[in-house]
Amino acid sequence: MLKKLLKYDMRANMKVFLLIWPALIIFSLLGRFSLTADLQGRLDTIFSTATIIVFVLAVFAAFLFSIVLAITRFYSGLLRNEGYLMFTLPVKPWQLIISKYLTSLITIVVTALLSVVSIFILCSGIPGFTADLHFFTAFMNREFHAGSYIMLALLMLAGVSTSIFQIYLACSIGQLFNKGRILFSALFYYLINVVLSVASTTFAIIFGTSRTLQEAVISIFEGMHIQTATFVALSISLLLSAALCCVYFFVTKYILSKRLNLE
Amino acid sequence: MNELVTCTALSKRYGSLTALDHIDLHIAPGRIIGLLGPNGSGKTTLIKILTGLLRPTEGSATVNGLPIGHESKALVSYLPERMYYANWMRTSDMLQLFADFYADFHIDRAKAMCNALGIGLKTRVKSMSKGTKEKLQLILVMSRQAKLYLLDEPIAGVDPAARDFILQTILTNYSKDSSVILSTHLITDIEPVLDEVIFLGNGRVLRHESVDAIREAEGRSVDAVFREIFRTIPVGGDWPC
C-alpha cells in the first residue's frame, strides 16, 4: 500500500518539478554559455549578469517550491478536504505520513543534487575552476575519510528529515484546534524551535561549567586521528538527529491516529 | 442474526459537548437505512466513527465484526458531504486511485457511468462544476462492491434530476449482502427507497424501526413522524407592552 501511496504523492509533486528540474539545467547551460561566449563589450556583461541572476533565482525557486510543496502536500493532502479520502483508504496512518515524507525527501534531495550539478555546469565556464576544485578536494580529503563522506551525506538527509517531520508535527498539533489552524501550526513550529534552543543552550551551559564532562569528552577524542574524530563527531550528530526524527514521527502518528480533527 | 454494523454504548464528546450519547445499534445486511435527525443530532459524527475518521470517546463499533481500522475501511464505501479531490487529478486518475486501493472497485462500471453522464475521463476535476464533482464522487463510491455504504447528505444541494440519478444509482448498485446508511434532511425524496429509519436526536437513538412498521403503527409517512418528533414550537406572538 505504501508503494501505491508513493505513486500518487510522487505524481502530485512531479506535476511541478518536471518543469522546474529541466529549467535548472537549461539556465545553468545558458549561464555557462554566457560566461564563455565571446560577445562585444557591454553586451557580454549584461548577458552574463542576466543569465546568472536568472540561474540563482531558479535555484532559489526550486528549493522554495520543494519546501512549500512539502508543507502543502501534508497539510492540504491530509488535514483538509483530501483527508476525507486519504484517511478512509484501507491504509495505516503511518503509511500516509511516510509516503508524504519520502516524496518530500526525494524531491528535496533531487533538487539539491541537480542544483549542485547545475552549479558545476555553470562554473565550468569560469577559467581556473578545475584547479580550484582540485585544491578544495585535496583539503576535504585531509579532514574526511570515505566513511565521513557517507556520514556527512546521512547527516544532511537526517537534517532535512528532521525539518520535514518538525513541520508535520506542528501541522498535526495545529489541526487539533477548530479555528486558526495555520496560525497554531506556525506557532507550534516556532515553539518546538524554542524548546530545542533552550535544550541546546542548557546543555552548552552545563558542558561549559562541568570540568568532568569536558574531561570525559576530551578523553574520547584524545589521541584520535583527525579523520576518525570527525567521523565520531558526525556519528553523534546523526544519532541525535535520528532520535529527534523518531520523536516527531511518533507524536505525529499518535495525533493523526487518535486525535484526527478534519475540518 | 447476522450483523453488519454493531455499535455498543457508543459515545463521542467534544469537550463539554456530547455529540453521541451511549448509542446501541444493530444493522443487518441488505438494508437501506435512513439516518434522520436535525442539525447537530450526531448523524455525521456517527458516520465519521464508522469510517474511522473519528475515534469514539467511549464504547465500541464494528463493521462486519471487525473493529474500525484499516481492515474495516476496505469494506466501507464512504461519501462525505464535501469534495475530497486533489486539484491536479483528472477523472481517470481518481478512477485509477480507487482501482489501486479498493479490490472491490469496478473500474469498467465507473467508466460506463461517467460515460452515461458525459463526464470525460480526461477532464480535470478542478474544471468541473459542483454538481459534476458530486456525481463523480457518487460514481466512485457506488462502483465499489462494498459491504457498507455510508452516504452523508448525498442529495443535499443537487437539482431534482441529479437527485433522481443519485437515488437510482444507490438502488441499482448496492447488493443484497451490503447495507446503505444515508443521512439526510430531505426525507420525502428518499422515503420510497428506505427499508429502515434511525431517528437521532441530541446524540441518542430515538427510534430505529422498519419503514413498514412505522407506517403500519402510525398510519402516516416517515416525514410526518419526523416532523412530529422534532417539532419546534416557533417563538412569537404579541410583544410585551
Image: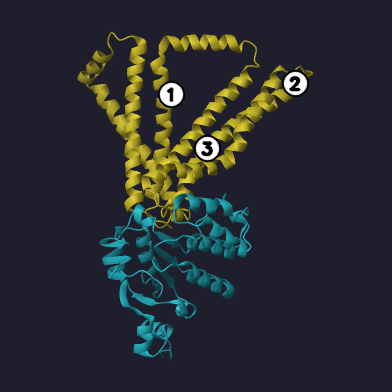
Chain colours: A yellow, B cyan
Q: Where the C terminus of chain A falls, by quadrant?
A: bottom left
Q: Residue at x 38, y 81 (%)?
A: B211
Classify B79 as above or below A49. below
Residue position for label 3: A66
The answer to whether any part of residue A234 appears in the image is yes
In percent of width and height, residue A9 lies at: 49, 43
Mark 1 belongs to which amino acid? Ala
State whether discs 3 and 2 lie on one chain.
Answer: yes
Residue position for label 1: A153
Q: Nearer the viewer, mark 2 or mark 1?
A: 1
Mark 2 belongs to which amino acid? Asp
Q: Within the image, what quadrant is residue B41 found in?
A: bottom left
Precedes in sequence: disc 1 or disc 3 = 3
Q: Where the N terminus of chain A falls, by quadrant?
A: top left
Q: Residue furthest left?
A: A212
Q: Kindly state the secondary structure of the residue where label 2 is placed.
A: helix
**Which mark, by number, is residue B73?**
none
Mark 3 belongs to which amino acid? Ser
Q: Residue at x 56, y 27 (%)?
A: A115
Q: CA distance from mark 1 to mark 3?
A: 19 Å
Classify A122 as above or below A192. above
Q: Kindly state the secondary structure of the residue where label 1 is placed.
A: helix
Residue position for label 2: A44
In percent of width and height, residue B216 lies at: 36, 88
State whether discs 1 and 3 lie on one chain.
Answer: yes
Which chain does the residue under circle 3 lie in? A
B7 relative to A189 in the view: left or right:
left
Q: CA distance from mark 3 to mark 2?
A: 33 Å
Q: Nearer the viewer, residue B83 or A142?
A: B83
